[in-house]
Every structure is written in structure tokens, then in C-alpha cells.
Amino acid sequence: MSRGLESIEKPKGKTKAEDNSKLVLIHTIRSTDLANTIIESLDNLIYQELGCKDGEYDLYVCSEGLSMASKGDATLDLATYKGVLLSKIYEHYGDNLCRLFTYSPPTLKATAGCSKKELQKDKRNMIMAFGREPIDAPLLRAINDGSLILKTNFVDGVDDISDSYWALRTMIKKEKLQFP
């Protein structure tokens, strides 16, 4: 495991300024390590699994924008991590990177069919809409059979995967992209 991926605990320094400085370093290391891990996975997909050669593909990247209603340190941390990731993607893929798209949470909800007021607040609606997609995949089967639900909520990360899927579907729809 890279040194930035261990859990982050609030440092126990002598002053609040020292604590904050330590947290900044931890988040910097962690965001960079996570971005590098994601890029390594993308490289594996592009070069090994798809068999592309450098310069022979166009890369489109999409993501969910930050919620304007979000507040606090966690939102700032998320914005920082996303900025580091997008910067590293641009740095690594250069001319192969065609576009970076960001779509608001309400736009993703609309693509998923969850834009009605009564459906917007509960993350499970987006996950369940994802589970109804016509894809045969172990993750979707696990969503549908309930094996990813702990007591009442889905296990951590399922909502992020669902949001990523809806970002991709939104990009394809909004940008009118066609794939072979």
C-alpha cells in the first residue's frame, strides 16, 4: 500500500497550526497516491485490455460536480482530490485527452430518472436505477439481490460507482457521443 492510502487520523501536534499543517501533508500525499493509482488502472485498461497504442485513442473524462449544498472540510477535501486527479490525468495523457466534462448532481439524477423531488434526497434511488440498467455484471446482480446492503444502507462506495456510471451515461447523452 502506498504511504498515502492509510486511514487519516487527526494528528496530535502541539498546536492547531501544526495539526493543520500535518493534515495538509497527509491529504496531499493521499490525493496524489490515489490519482496515480487511478491512472495506473486506466493505463492497464487502455494499453493491456484494449490494446491501444499511445496516440491512437481519444480520451474523454467525465465526473460529477460538487453539490452546492455541501459544506465543511470534507467538501473542500473532495474538491482538492478531484482537482489533483484531473490535473494528473491531463499531465499523463496530454494530447490523447480530448475533453473533461463535469455534470451537476441534478443533471445526473435526471439521466437516472431520479429528478422528481421525492427521489432526489435518497442516494439509494440512484443506486437502484443503476441496478435496473440492462447490464449483466456481478455488481448489478449484487445490488439487486441485496447482498451489498448492510443494515439499511448500501456498503460504502456503491453510491460512488453508481454516480460514475450516471456521469458516463450523461456524457454520452449530452455530448451525443457514438461508439463503435
Image (cartoon, grey):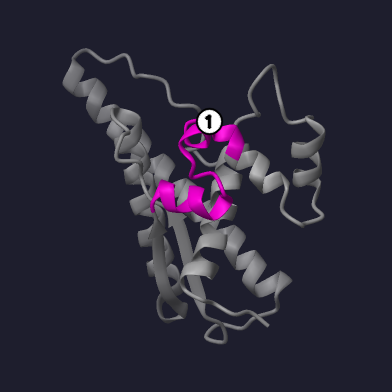
**Three-letter residue code for mark 1:** Asp
Decide: is 37 above or below 156.
below
Q: Quadrant of residue 146?
A: top right
Count the marks.
Answer: 1
Rendered residue at 36%/52% (across/down): 84
Left or right of 47? Residue 109 is left
Our reading of the magenta stretch's main secondary structure is helix
Secondary structure of the residue carrying tag 1 is loop
Asked whether residue 108 is drawn in magenta, I would say: yes
Highlighted magenta segment, given as a residue range: 104-125
For mark 1, what is the residue?
Answer: 122
Image coordinates for residue 130, horizontal then vertical, percent: 66, 47
Rendered residue at 71%/45% (across/down): 131
Left or right of 93? Residue 180 is right
Q: Is residue 56 visible?
A: yes
Rendered residue at 49%/71% (across/down): 60
Quadrant (top left, top right, bottom left, bottom right) of the N terminus: top right
Foreground of the two, 34 or 108: 108
Asked whether residue 84 is drawn in magenta, I would say: no
Image coordinates for residue 115, horizontal then vertical, percent: 48, 45
Foreground of the two, 57 or 108: 108
